[in-house]
């Protein structure tokens, strides 16, 4: 037992111990609360910039050339002996490929449902008949809706209207994520480059409010560049192993060079990932882990910052439990690597090249985000538990295997009993 305790009882490097310079309470809960506050403040400007980019994209997708009234649609029918009538004045515009008439009809159906529910009060008395009536009218052509919606509603046959509406609400998030997948590269470039504001927020607070040195955030002097270059190499090796595992298992295949690939866009994304990788390492490893390490056990600092790292990815498109586990594993690896490497330079580089290779070279989604046209095209293989599906490689078992091996290796490097792995 004593050998086991010694194995996990790691001696902190100087840069982590120097976080003791921070003024005030070092309790874990205080550090976590401070982290969230700084995160919120640091992301005000990035959020504004991303909203401007998003609104600009939506405006381009909607044809606002004419807003004159174009159609008046009236839907009439009977539900359980009660007549209803719903009129809708359409407007001459289209959005995301849906023409004015389709939008008007869809709005009319939804507005009638909402009005009838509110006026009836007791849904249970009419919901089944209303469901049957609506489905019948759709099938008979009395109500005309997009084919996709007709198929979608037919899936709910036999369910109550309440269940239909609940299911519709449940798909709002999924549909939003699909829309996010259509966002242009410019949106993601804005998101990546704007992370510099959050990075500076954490650095300025630590330096001037907590009176900490840059070294205590992991910016150890002397050989930052050499550590960064070494980290790029290690990151390339790690993600290369992920790709090989996917290829070997047959879960992906490459379809050749992408003719739409842009070298200039690729360079812009690499610059953006340099800033984004540094941002997350400064926040989670440089600031949070170092603050927790001086008051709590080192492993508490590692687990807390890694779990929060996973928590911040929970709303990404295509996220699964395995994806969150892998994100947490990456956090543990980065924490141990920063400790072994005496600073966060290498961890920043690994983070950067991992995301860049994933999205802009090999064509995976990066934590659920599509980063534009990659250098290589993936084949038409279906999403599975190995390649990660719509979340990207980080949602698959190939990444799990690579990160578990990486964690074991870097843990062994940190352990005072360097031969434990041989026992």
Image: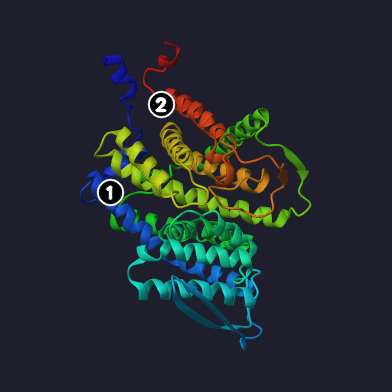
Instruction: Give the residue at x 71% y 37%.
Output: 253
Q: Position of residue 109 (x, y in %)?
A: 52, 72
The outermost residue toward the top is 423
Q: Position of residue 332 (x, y in %)?
A: 42, 35
In this figure, which residue is indicated by the disc labeled 2?
414
Q: Position of residue 1 (x, y in %)?
A: 27, 15
The outermost residue toward the left is 25
State whether residue 286 is above or below residue 399.
below
Q: As rendered, which of 400 and 269 lies closer to the eye?
A: 400
Helix, strand or loop at mark 1:
helix
Q: CA distance from mark 1 to mark 2?
A: 25 Å
State whether residue 376 is above or below residue 129.
above
Q: Is residue 124 left or right of residue 318?
A: left
Q: Is residue 204 visible?
A: no
In this figure, which residue is indicated by the disc labeled 1?
31
Q: As rendered, which of 106 and 13 lies closer to the eye?
A: 106
Q: Is residue 9 left or right of residue 224?
A: left
Q: Specify the label residue 147 is tagged with.
A: none
Q: Position of residue 356 (x, y in %)?
A: 61, 46
The outermost residue toward the front is 81
Instruction: Give the residue at x 55% y 46%.
Output: 391
Q: Quadrant of residue 419?
A: top left
Instruction: Give the residue at x 20% y 48%.
Output: 25
CB atoms at circles 1 and 2 under 8 Å apart?
A: no
């Amino acid at each position: 037992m004593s050998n086991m305790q010694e194995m996990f009882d790691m001696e902190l490097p100087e840069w982590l111990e120097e976080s003791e310079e921070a003024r005030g309470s070092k309790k874990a809960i205080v550090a976590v609360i401070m982290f969230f506050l700084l995160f919120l403040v640091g992301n005000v400007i990035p959020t504004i910039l991303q909203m401007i980019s998003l609104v600009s994209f939506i405006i381009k997708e909607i044809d606002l050339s004419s807003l004159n009234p174009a159609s008046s649609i009236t839907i009439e029918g009977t539900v359980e002996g009660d007549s209803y009538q719903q009129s809708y004045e359409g407007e001459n515009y289209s959005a995301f490929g849906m023409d004015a008439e389709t939008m008007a009809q869809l709005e009319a159906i939804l507005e009638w449902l909402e009005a009838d529910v509110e006026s009836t009060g007791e849904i249970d008395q009419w919901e089944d008949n209303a469901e049957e009536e609506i489905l019948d009218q759709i099938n008979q052509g009395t109500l005309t809706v997009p084919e996709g919606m007709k198929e979608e509603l037919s899936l709910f046959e036999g369910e109550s209207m309440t269940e239909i509406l609940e299911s519709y609400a449940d798909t709002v998030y999924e549909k939003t994520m699909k829309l996010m997948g259509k966002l242009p590269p410019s949106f993601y470039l804005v998101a990546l480059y704007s992370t510099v504001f959050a990075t500076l927020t954490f650095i300025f607070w630590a330096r001037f409010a907590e009176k900490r040195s840059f070294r205590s955030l992991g910016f150890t002097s002397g050989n930052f560049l050499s550590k960064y270059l070494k980290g790029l190499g290690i990151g390339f090796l790690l993600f290369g192993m992920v790709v090989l595992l996917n290829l070997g298992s047959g879960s992906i295949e490459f379809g050749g060079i992408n003719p739409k690939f842009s070298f200039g866009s690729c360079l812009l994304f690499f610059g953006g990932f340099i800033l984004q990788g540094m941002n997350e390492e400064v926040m989670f490893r440089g600031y949070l882990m170092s603050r927790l390490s001086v008051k709590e056990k080192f492993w508490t600092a590692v687990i807390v910052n890694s779990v929060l790292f996973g928590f911040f990815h929970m709303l990404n498109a295509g996220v699964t439990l395995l994806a969150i586990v892998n994100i947490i594993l990456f956090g543990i690896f980065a924490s141990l690597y920063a400790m072994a490497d005496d600073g966060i330079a290498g961890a920043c580089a690994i983070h950067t090249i991992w995301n860049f290779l994933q999205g802009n070279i090999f064509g995976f989604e990066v934590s659920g985000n599509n980063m534009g046209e990659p250098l290589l095209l993936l084949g038409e293989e279906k999403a599975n538990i190995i390649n990660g599906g719509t979340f990207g490689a980080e949602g698959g078992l190939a990444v799990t295997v690579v990160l578990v091996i990486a964690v074991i290796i870097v843990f062994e490097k940190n352990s005072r009993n360097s031969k434990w792995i041989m026992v």
